[in-house]
Amino acid sequence: MRVMLWLLCLVAASASLWGFAPLAPEAESITQVFVSNITIVESAESARHADEYARLQQRLQRSTGSWGTSHPRHRLLTALHGFHRYKERNLVEVKRWRDWYKQIPKRQRSMVESTVHYTRKLNTVEHLFEANERVAHAIVENGMRFYNVSQAELDGFIQETERDGGTTDRTSVSQAMKHFVRDWSDEGYDERQEAFPCVIDALASISRSEEQPLQVLVPGAGIGRLAHEIAGLGGMEVTMNEWSAYMNLAYRYISSLSVPHSMAFHPYIDWWSHHATTADLQRPVSFPDQVANPLSVLSVEGDFATVFSDNTEQYDVIVTLFFIDTARNLVSYLETIHRLLKPGGTWINLGPLLYGSAPFLQLSLDEIVALSERIGFTFDETDASCGGLTLAGHPVRGKEVAYARNGRGLMSLVESALAALRLNNAVTGASPVLAALIPGLGHVCEVQQPGKKADLAKSLGHRRPRASRSRGGCLSCKARKKKCDEVRPRCSDCRRLNLPCRWKPSSPASPDCTASAPSHTCTASPRSETSNSLTLASVTDPTSPSDTASLDDPIGSLSTWLTPEAIGAPVASPGGVSNPYLHNDEDRSLFNHYLHIVARALSRSGDPDSNPFLVTLLPMAAASDTITSVILGLSGCHWKRVYPTIWNHALARQGRALAQVSQLLSRPNAQATLEACATILLLCLTELFDGTSRVWKWHLKAAGALLTSAGVETLETTPEGRFCLHLFHYLDSMSTISRCKPPLLHDSDSLADLTADSGPPRSLPTAPSDPICGMAPALLDFLGMVNLLAAHRSRRVDELSEIGFRAAAAHVQSQLDAWRADYESSSSSGSALPDRDTDRATTAFEWAVRLRLHQIVHGYDPHHAAVETAITAILAAVLAIPYGSPVEGSLLFPLVIAGASSTAIERRMMVKERLMVMENTLGFGHIPHARQLLETVWAEGTEWNWARVRYSQFPGMVFI
């Protein structure tokens, strides 16, 4: 929010007054990474910290003062209650948004769902609130430890409050957490740079020394960034003061973090206005950008006007930032500041005059200046670096500053700024005109300028298209008496409902072509462009556990995309190929679920035309009952968490596919071999996604034998063969982590194979990424090499074998380094440039392979420098990949190995949060088991050997 700001630098008995004036509309901001000038000094707790902590505990005693809502302990418990109920209070808001959404007509909701997936947006925000809740609960746990609040006391307070009808303050909790962004994140850097430099420069100009440090007080310090910046100047003993228990809890938590960027949350999801994109609304922000040493600043909690009542002439400088307009009695603040300053001391103020609710008096700037002079302050001149003069006759300067701004928001609040602009008689620019081109409608919506007639020709040129009737629709839409958009070869409704789309024989001339324009070809209406893009995007995700309808009535959850017409007709793939092997409603439901949900979750490409689980498998399924059956089994495996009753039917089709494989193997032809191989690989995939089954090993070995007999060169000549090869390559390589054996298609298990070739491995796909694995496929070969090395660990029986083992490991390391150099070279030249998410997934997986190599050679010590380097690289890459990205499925192995090697609770929470999100965005059952594996490793907390835990307690786990 942009507000009017002003800066005062007042000196008691000989003082100066500087001012900051109002803001202009906010400029576009770019999030960057910056290093601040905070100096971290490790030191033992000082006497003043110990004394203040003892005084704080005394103030918090229930026996101190009268018990009530203004008692310090009551306010503390109220704030703890608010953070404790963070998720519940915000989910109430989401439910309210859902209820509002249900008020619009069903037809409009259907259009919204098929275009922007609004229900999915609501579901995602619910999950993100769950992620934020972990930060809120961490604040509660840290606060209870710091303030010595027992769980029993907090539970009793919550029960009593809620029994009496009390609710929590959602706004105060949200504001405190958003201060993590403003004060302690890279995203808040620009905002801090607008406000802090003048204050810091003014302080830096005051003479001081380490022997005689300046005593500096920062009232209204929030969560403390300015106070720590001041302490970083050196030669100052800084005290900060904050009244809000919510802010104090947040500050105590930020002071407890020991690793930069170790926490992340989603600060903007509680307010949906003025966002350019949904990704901006849902984006995470990591914090802290710097570790704050709590011993460099003393925090005194309580009301500024009373908590320092025993102090007089104690401070050389008082700095107030966005503070004095929070006073109910501003005169009391002025008198307290004057009393606390030493003779000749300085007061520096930066902030607006945006008064809160029920202040006793609301003073204008000139009135504050007059009162300050009356109390005993005088004003000093200052230079123009802090803005222009604001108040005639006084050296009060003004500058534009933002406060609590969303750097990617579309609007800033400027009411206070406009009032100040009128005070300054400033000339403001015209407000921007909103103009929006609505895709698919072919006209421009814009604001008409007041007092100006609209251009008639322009208006007619952009007039809303009139409804018209056409007889050129498809036969399917005509039979259902539905309007057809006439997109050929398959209209949008037929695509959406997976119906066969048939047309009348083409006439010599299209009825839409006019004789007056023979030289022009006939084109579809502008709307057809939009309709054509809704091939696979027209359904609500029925797998989300947040959708209560899907839990209570699984069939009902299909109502947005499964209609009676769709049930009654053969189901067709997006390419228009009808599948004749769907015999009942359950078959069609499972097949639709595969088309719209499972196939997308399996592919690491966001483009349906590049998704091999659609473009390759669906034509195979249309010609094979076996492939259709195994697809339905895979779909049911994915769906059974939300729709358990469908699993029995899916299991029956899966068993049918397994029985039919033997018949296929009895046919001595290449097509039957491919069909059998694809079926076995999908059966293997189904068992792997279960997370507990060990049957996948037999499926994988059988598929390997089939591929070997068919020959790699022969298989590469057909799309079906390439699909089988690439899927096997992925599953085989990933399973080596669990088998600790070389890949099945590897010719030998000798260590000599690792040193035979000097160059990077030659992987099957030549592209920089693959839609099955979602990263550079060469890394799968490196993973196989690393696990070939793992198979030889037990053979290190003497010095010679140890030397050979380490030489092989060093060779793998050098090959990885050479591959990285080639990868960066090709990316920088643009010859094979992956998209950003794929590049980040590749980086995360590469460092996971490097970390696994280190563990195989050196063991599982989490404190090794190489481990820290790898974890930092993995988590940085993962954090940059947005939730729901197509490559998210490639992150399971990097997350598990980084999480298992992390000792910091903040990093563990980051990993756990991402896994919980993936449980919902991907929906496969092995992901919760991976999270349980990590929690088991963390609970043991001694050996850090996640591979042993996987082998002994999670034997079916493969990190695909």
Image (cartoon, rainbow, N blue to C red):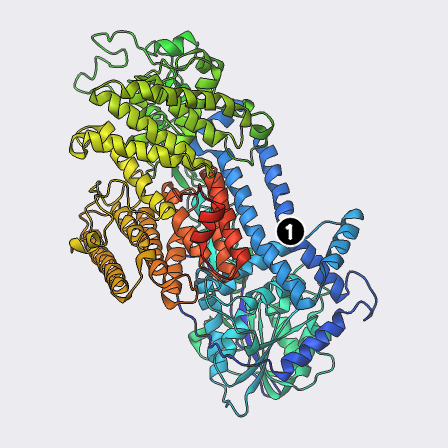
Give the camera-side residue of 763 and 473. 763
- The residue sitting at 82% across, 64% down in the picture is 67
**Callout 1: 10 Å neighbours few (<14), some, many (20+)?**
some
Nearer to us in this view, 764 or 158? 764
Residue appearing at x 17%, y 48% in the figure: 831
Q: Mark 1 — residue?
A: 170
> At 31% across and 40% down in the image, what residue appears?
732
Element at label 1:
helix
Vertical comparison of 89 with 61: above or below: above
- Residue 16 quadrant: bottom right
Residue at image position (61%, 37%) is 95
The x and y percentages for residue 180 are 53, 61
Residue 496 visible from this viewpoint: yes
Residue 418 % position (x, y): 52, 57
Q: How many labels sit on residues?
A: 1
Could you say where residue 528 lies in the image, as x and y percent from the top left?
33, 24
Residue 868 lies in quadrant: bottom left
